[in-house]
Image (cartoon, rainbow, N blue to C red):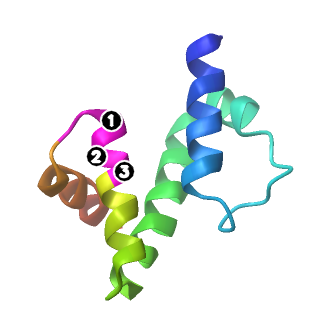
Amino acid sequence: MIQSRNTANLIKTVYHGKICSNCDIERISKQYPTELAYVLAMILARSVANAADYEGKSRVDYLSDRLGIEREETFKIIQYSA
């Protein structure tokens, strides 16, 4: 349960302004984990694709750091999901 809340808070932080702040991420992640991952990847992919600026790249760096995976691997996951 704690892991789920931490994950929900991380998602809300990273995707602030991109998803509804009233969305019950914790419930959705339990009931529809694959679908949630796909949607978040699509949102992030759009941010990366549109980001010739620092903001999009910093999101990828932030996710990479939090997930403990290399930045290049994060890009591969995003591209594969898109």
Q: Amino acid at mark 2?
A: Ser
Answer left or right for 77 relative to 43.
left
Residue 50 visible? The answer is yes
Residue 60 x %, y %: 33, 59
The picture places residue 71, in percent across and down from the top left corner, at 18, 53
Q: Can you give x and y, in whole percent of width and height, for residue 1 in the image?
A: 65, 11
Point out the stretch of residues depicted in magenta. Answer: 62-69
**Residue 49 occupies quadrant:** bottom left
C-beta proximity under 8 Å, tags 3 and 1: no
Which residue is rendered at x = 25% and y = 33% of the image?
A: 68
The image shows residue 78, relative to residue 8, as above or below, that is: below
User: Amino acid type of disc 1?
Assistant: Leu
What mark, if any, has residue 67 been given in the picture?
A: 1
Circle 2/circle 1 CB separation < 8 Å: yes
| Label 2 crowd bin: few (<14), some (14–19), many (20+), radius 10 Å | some
**The label number, if any, that marks residue 64 in the structure image:** 2
Label 3 close to label 2 by CB (< 8 Å): yes
Label 2 secondary element: helix
Mark 2 → mark 1, Cα distance in angstroms? 5 Å
Q: Is residue 65 magenta?
A: yes
Q: Nearer the viewer, mark 3 or mark 1?
A: 3
